[in-house]
Image (spheres, rainbow, N blue to C red):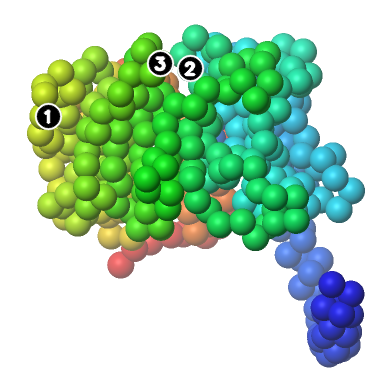
């Protein structure tokens, strides 16, 4: 609206006139810009022997997506979101490689809106394959294990004059098959009788099921439903009913499904459910601890659980039966995140950040129980000049 735009411009003129008169701002800006101008890399995702990650050279508005065909091979640029628009307001949002690493489904976010347009990139050629899925919002992207397509969540297409005013009603999960038009996408799960619910779809580790996590509003109270991916049209099975607790799917081995939950455990625990049973009951695998459980993953034949212990990260390795085997040694006092991957992988990656050290990416060899730096940023100061202690 021209009137609003003029009001904002007038406000900024008053504000900038005052701020520009304060001495020393240029020196602060130069020093802070220099300190922020260092290379940053995200935690890589491994699929099909390839390693996908985002990297920022320092002052880029957005971090481009790169791929390596081997752990320490040369990198190749796949997507540079800085070229999406002249004003820099179009962003690369979610991105997920297919299981064989041949394709990447990625979401484009325009102007800060929650709406997404999903496209698919051929990794070998670095070119889009032409698939486009619109009206995606509040969605995960989860590939079928055979790479034939991916699951996503969307709302009905809004009226042309109400794109940013439509209510978030009738969220629905679809499957998009590569090489087909969106109009042919198959509806997988919907709750027309409860239009206020939102649904997130995740393909189970064995590819047999689509795990649907449904929620009402923003509370972390979920209902979990299983859809048999091998039997389109089969009746969905409600595994965890009631919208009473937080149940976050970790993975599965056969009929045993692992979840992080707060049911009877405010600081969270890991449970397993055997879906071969008619009415599976949660079995405690990792009991609630004095520390708060931040998350867990199934990697390298182990359960890796991350905790918040006295305001810092502690990562523990457990057997599938829940027995604690070791604590991963971190580079210091700080925050670690990541530890994703496949059950069959021998490695996983994590990011570590401390008060004196910007984010560094480490590779953890699960079998050898050893960590090594995979990416270390080059800095204008020496982190070792500062000591970090907890008292």
Determine whether the residue tagged by mark 2 lies in a helix, strand or loop.
loop
Measure how far apart labels 3 and 1 are at the Cα level: 23 Å
Label number found at residue 114: none
* Residue tagged 2: 144
Left or right: 195 as drawn, with respect to 309: right
Mark positioned earlier in the residue sequence (2 or 3): 2
* Residue tagged 3: 232
Left or right: 136 as drawn, with respect to 62: left
Residue 315 figure quarter = top left
Measure how far apart labels 2 and 3 are at the Cα level: 13 Å
Q: Residue at x 17, y 36 (%)?
A: 271
Can residue 262 be seen? no
Measure how far apart labels 2 and 1 are at the Cα level: 26 Å
> Where residue 339 sits in the image (x, y, percent)?
41, 33
Q: Nearer the viewer, mark 3 or mark 1?
A: 3
> Where residue 285 sits in the image (x, y, percent)?
14, 34
311 in relation to 264, above or below: below
- Quadrant location of the N terminus in the rendered image: bottom right
386 or 67: nearer the eye? 67
* Residue tagged 1: 280
């Amino acid at each position: 609206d021209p009137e609003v735009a003029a009001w904002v411009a007038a406000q900024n003129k008053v504000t900038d006139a005052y701020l520009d008169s304060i001495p020393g701002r240029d020196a602060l800006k130069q020093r802070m810009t220099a300190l922020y101008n260092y290379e940053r890399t995200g935690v890589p995702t491994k699929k099909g022997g390839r390693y996908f990650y985002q990297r920022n050279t320092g002052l880029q508005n957005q971090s481009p997506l790169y791929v390596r065909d081997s752990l320490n091979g040369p990198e190749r640029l796949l997507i540079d979101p800085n070229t999406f628009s002249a004003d820099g307001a179009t962003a690369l949002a979610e991105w997920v490689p297919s299981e064989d690493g041949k394709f990447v489904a990625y979401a484009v976010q325009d102007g800060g809106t929650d709406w997404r347009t999903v496209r698919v990139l051929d990794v070998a050629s670095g070119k889009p394959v032409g698939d486009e899925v619109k009206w995606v919002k509040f969605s995960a992207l989860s590939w079928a294990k055979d790479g034939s397509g991916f699951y996503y969540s969307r709302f009905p297409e809004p009226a042309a004059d109400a794109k940013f005013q439509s209510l978030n009603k009738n969220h629905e999960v679809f499957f998009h098959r590569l090489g087909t038009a969106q109009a042919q996408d198959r509806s997988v799960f919907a709750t027309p009788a409860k239009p206020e619910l939102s649904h997130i779809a995740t393909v189970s580790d064995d590819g047999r099921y689509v795990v649907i996590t449904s929620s009402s509003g923003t509370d972390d109270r979920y209902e979990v439903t299983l859809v048999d991916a091998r039997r389109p049209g089969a009746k969905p099975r409600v595994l965890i009913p009631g919208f009473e607790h937080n149940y976050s799917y970790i993975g599965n081995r056969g009929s045993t499904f692992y979840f992080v939950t707060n049911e009877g455990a405010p600081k969270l625990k890991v449970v397993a459910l055997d879906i071969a049973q008619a009415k599976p009951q949660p079995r405690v695998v990792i009991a609630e601890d004095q520390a708060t459980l931040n998350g867990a993953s199934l990697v390298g034949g182990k359960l890796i659980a991350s905790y918040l212990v006295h305001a810092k990260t502690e990562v523990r390795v457990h057997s599938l039966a829940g027995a604690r085997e070791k604590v991963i040694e971190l580079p210091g006092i700080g925050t670690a995140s990541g530890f994703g991957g496949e059950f069959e992988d021998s490695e996983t990656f994590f990011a570590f950040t401390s008060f004196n050290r910007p984010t560094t990416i480490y590779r953890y060899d699960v079998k050898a129980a050893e960590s090594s730096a995979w990416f270390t940023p080059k800095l204008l100061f020496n982190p070792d000049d500062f000591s970090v202690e907890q008292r």
